[in-house]
Image (cartoon, helix red, strand yellow):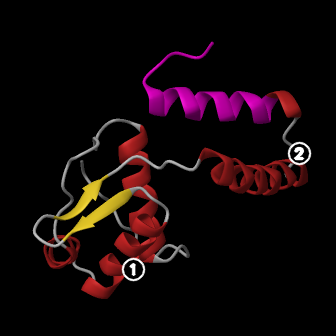
Amino acid sequence: MLIHINTCAQTPLYEQLRDQIIIGIASNQLRQGESLPSVRSLAADLGINFHTVNKAYSMLFDEGYIIMDRRKGGIISQPKDNDEYSELLQTKLSLAAAEAICHGITENEFVSICKQNFNKLRGTKNA
C-alpha cells in the first residue's frame, strides 16, 4: 500500500496517516494480522518526524485498528465495539450531512456519494 502525505494540507500529518491506514484496511490493501512498518522506518520513508507516525499508530491502537507487539510492532486488528462506533458514526455523519446541506447537496446526492464511497472501498459496484 502506498501512503501519500500532503505536507501543505491543513489536515495534520498524523491524521492523514491514520486515515490512509484505515482506508487501506477497509479496502483490503492491509489485512488482519499484517504488520505495519516500524515507526522509525515509516517516518524515514515518508520524510516526517517519527513522533508524527507514533501519534498516528497510537490513535489506531486506541481505536482498535491495530495491536502493538514489542517484537513485530503494529499489527492490523479488527475493531470490535460496534455499538460505540455506531454512536461515533452518527456524530460524523450528522456533521457531514450538515455540511452537505450548507453546500446545496440534496439528500439523494448525499446518499449516492456515501454509497459510491462505501462500494469503492468494498470493491463492489453501486446497487
Q: Secondary structure at mark 1?
A: helix
Which image quarter: residue 40?
Answer: bottom left
Residue 49 seen by the camera = no
Image disc number at residue 5: none
Q: Amino acid at mark 1?
A: Lys
Q: Residue furthest top?
A: 127
Q: Which is nearer the eye, 13 or 83? A: 83
Residue at left offset 29%, top offset 57%: 3
* Relative to 49, residue 19 above or below: above
Indicate the quadrant where residue 17 lies.
bottom left
Q: Left of 83 or right of it: where is 28? A: left
Q: Is residue 49 left or right of residue 111?
A: left
Which amino acid type is marked by label 2? Gly
Where is mark 2, residue-wise? 104
Magenta-tinted stretch = 109-127
Per the image, the residue denoted by label 1 is 55
